[in-house]
Image: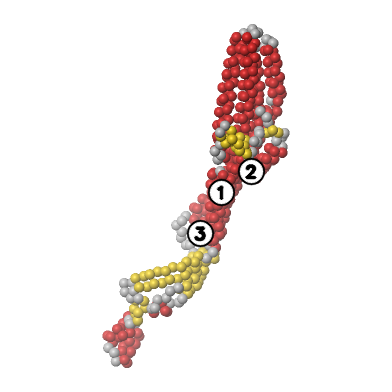
Amino acid sequence: MTSRIESGHTQQTISFWDAWQKVISENDGLAAERANVDRYRHMQDAARDLYLPKVTASANYTRLDQAVEIKPSDLAASMPAGEAIQGIAQMLGINPANIDRLFTSQLTDRDVFTSSIRAVWPIFTGGRITAAQDIAEGQTVEAKSLLAMKQQATFEDLSKFYFGVVMSKQVLDTRIDVENGLKKHWEHAQKLEQQGQIARVERLQAEASYDKARVDRQKAQRDLEIAQAALSRLLKFPGAVMPSTALFINPSLPPMHTFIDKTLADYPGLQILDAKRRQARGLIDAEKGKYYPEVFLYGNYSLHEDDTLAAKTAPDWAVGVGVSIPLVDNGGRSGKVKAAHSAVTQVNYLRAQAEQDLSVLVEKTYREAMQSLEEYHGLASSLSLAQENLNLREKAFSQGLSTSLDVVDAELYLAGIRTQRSAAAYQYVMSLTKLLAVSSDINQFSQYQQYQGIKVQS
């Protein structure tokens, strides 16, 4: 990748593969999809923690309307206790009416502060934790597949913009050659008119054709600048970009079934559907799990103890096993299980249809690529004929045996053949790019371009 200054503007020369690496590292759309993958990967990590115990520390402050006390008179409702109180009063020589004042015990103050650590550890959840982890893993796979699809689409966009510039440059070169050729023809016509060998109308025809060629060259120049601007925006480069990788063709392509099999095996869109099916099955397991009881261990340890009778008599810690059995649920478990089954069925049908559509797409693209190759090779003889016809017309015109219009037509016919061959090579590269993208074989592009490719000249 090199840079140079042309006409006061920085121009970047870059190969296609370097351009692709730059897009991978700097494209905002790809960066957004990578962030989405990170998001679901973190969510998957979070789902792994569902099997861990939940430990919480809590503290509470409570203000009671009055302190909690136990009075002897509160026990009077019990006949044996009442008789015991009367006996105690007689033994001590105390008025039974004053015994409450002397023997009242305070359990808690009005201000109560408690703090503790509580742990709950799920032992059996009916498979809901495993289902949640499967769903999270499916979401991560889906996010990765979306990133892969975004990369494929971006690769096709880069190919379209990059080789669009290459083709625009070839068209411009062709238009420059036509302009130069018709300029020489016009200058030659001027001399022949001055010598009286051709009529004035022949010179005017040559001049008009030259002016039209100049206009076409200027339009081709603007088209190139527009194509370069689009490529520069994609590559985030402030100046103009000039590709260093030329259009190319290949002698042949692998059999069609190779691309179809690779596509059906690796296309990320199918992997997205597989991930959605996995998520739907996870929902089935999660909803079925609501029919099963939950079993968990729990424990509690008191961190703070008030200086009260209740606090001193309360235990410092407690552990146990808990079971929660669903009897009646208003969440619609049965309906949700059926809905999840329907989702799996839907995904199965979508995948079958997607496989058919992909097979058709690959076959269509493959045939288009082969058609472009046939067109390019088939125009080789036409190119030779057009070049020879132009040479003969120019000689015949100089001898007065041909008209200026014949020379112009020959020049334009040659330009048309050159442009048509460039367009065929461009369409071939576009078809090849789509085949490699849809079959998740982008890395093989350099193999087709560098090692097997035949460079196409304008």
Please tell me which residue is depicted at 33% across the width and 89% down the height of the picture: 88
Q: Which of 179 and 22 is in front in this view?
A: 179
Pinpoint residue 381: horizontal percent, then vertical percent. 71, 23
Q: Say what amino acid the circle numbered 1 marks.
A: Arg
Please tell me which residue is depicted at 34% across the width and 87% down the height of the picture: 84
Alpha-carbon neighbours of circle 3 within 10 Å: few (<14), some, or many (≥20)? some
Q: Nearer the viewer, residue 247 or 318?
A: 247
Q: Which of 445 and 207 is in front in this view?
A: 207
Pinpoint residue 138: horizontal percent, then vertical percent. 57, 52
Task: Give the vertical position of 413 relative to 139 (above or below).
Answer: above
Q: Say what amino acid the circle numbered 2 marks.
A: Ser
Examine the image and state in which quarter residue 225 appears.
top right
Q: Say what amino acid the circle numbered 3 marks.
A: Lys
Give yes or no for contact between labels 3 and 2 (Cβ–Cβ under 8 Å): no
Examine the image and state in which quarter residue 376 appears.
top right
**Secondary structure at numbered mark 1:** helix
Question: In this image, 236 relative to 85: left or right?
Answer: right
Precedes in sequence: disc 1 or disc 2: 1
Disc ID at residue 290: 3
Pinpoint residue 217: horizontal percent, then vertical percent. 59, 24
Residue 161 visible in the displayed image: no
Disc ID at residue 440: 2
Precedes in sequence: disc 3 or disc 2: 3
Question: In this image, 398 relative to 233: left or right?
Answer: right
The residue mark sitting in front, 3 or 2, is 2
Disc ID at residue 34: 1
Please tell me which residue is depicted at 32% across the width and 92% down the height of the picture: 91
**Secondary structure at numbered mark 2:** loop
